[in-house]
Amino acid sequence: MDLSFEQQVDALARRRLGTTGVEALETLTAGANKGTWAFRADGQGFILQRQAPSGAPDPDAGPDDWVPHLDGTEEFKVMLAAQAADVPVPHVRHILVEEDGLGEGAVTERVEGETIPARVLRQPELVEARKRMAGQCGRILAQIHRVPTGQLGFLRHFDAAETLALFERTLDRVGLPLPPLELALRWARERLPRQARTTLVHGDFRTGNFIVGPEGIRAVLDWEIAHVGDPMEDLGYLCMRTWRFGGAGAVGGFGAREDLYAAYEKASGLAVDPEAARFWEVAGAMRWALGCVRRAHAWRHQQGRKLEFAAVGRRIEEPVYDLLNVIEGLD
């Protein structure tokens, strides 16, 4: 007899978490990459995340191309390593296995707080948090960049040159005339960071992937594109205009680069190279622009044609405008 989803989650909580059962199971998101549910068991809050089905084939993907996308088991192994290094992440309680019958994913303890960027940047009760968050980001990134990767052999390596080569292959495969991205590639090749360190890189460290309370950042989410590379990538990506969501601060819409850099340097004991961070800000905008193109192409091959994919595809003008401004030094 097949169990319902609710029964499967209840059995999971009893068997893996040692609880007496599940209550208040609710769907939080059903996104393109993950499904997320919240539930309570024995008075404690938990989050279940499952990898979404792959859906339509990506017509622009090659066997070794695009950003590193971890599967639903690997992502949580990275989170466990970050957790062991005192990075603020939701505590991972169980990584799903085949016997659970729920696919790839994990159960974490629920961390209360706000994640929606518009609310993080505008809610009056978070005004003091916003004053602290640039410094907190610097300290958290220093922690992330110290996480040992020896037990994370599945992580892909992307330095600056490898990243640009990947973008070029993707742009060629898209087959559309996109002169701003060709210009950005040329600009970036002339400014490759030299003698970069190699560390764990979160890859998507930005507003929207933080759980925020009145005291500031409580946890960092969405580790699915973590990889090994230049730590300046995380600092530059955080400062992209796209991730400011209309906020005035260059850092995530809430803070100043100077505060981010100073906190990072103090926590890591290493100097920030502003030009390297700027390089990665442009690279981040290129990644987002190519992601928009790929979403639009994928939409054309979908049977159900998800509106989300079409909507993302239409946003390519935003990262193109942003990267041109950064190249011109207007930001």
Image (tube, rainbow, N blue to C red):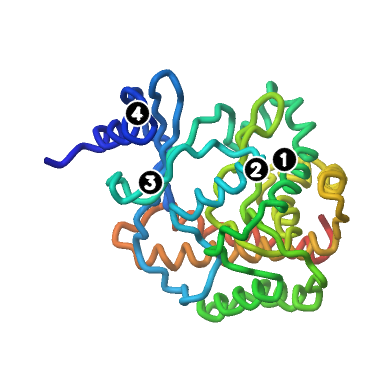
Kindly identify which residue carries mark 1: 247
Q: What is the distance, in whole Å, between disc 4 and disc 3 at their CAs?
A: 18 Å
Kindly identify which residue carries mark 4: 25
Q: What is the distance, in whole Å, between disc 1 and disc 4 at their CAs?
A: 34 Å
Q: Nearer the viewer, mark 4 or mark 3?
A: 3
Kindly identify which residue carries mark 2: 207
- The tag earlier along the polypeptide, 2 or 3, is 3
- The tag earlier along the polypeptide, 2 or 1, is 2
Are discs 2 and 1 less than 8 Å apart at CB?
A: yes
**Is residue 144 left or right of 196 when viewed as pictured?**
left
**Is residue 74 left or right of 252 when viewed as pictured?**
left
- The tag earlier along the polypeptide, 1 or 3, is 3
Q: Nearer the viewer, mark 1 or mark 3?
A: 3
Are discs 2 and 3 less than 8 Å apart at CB?
A: no
Q: What is the distance, in whole Å, between disc 1 and disc 3 at their CAs?
A: 38 Å
The percent position of residue 327, horizontal first and vertical second, equals 79, 66
- The tag earlier along the polypeptide, 4 or 2, is 4
The percent position of residue 229, horizontal first and vertical second, equals 68, 64
Residue 28: quarter of image: top left
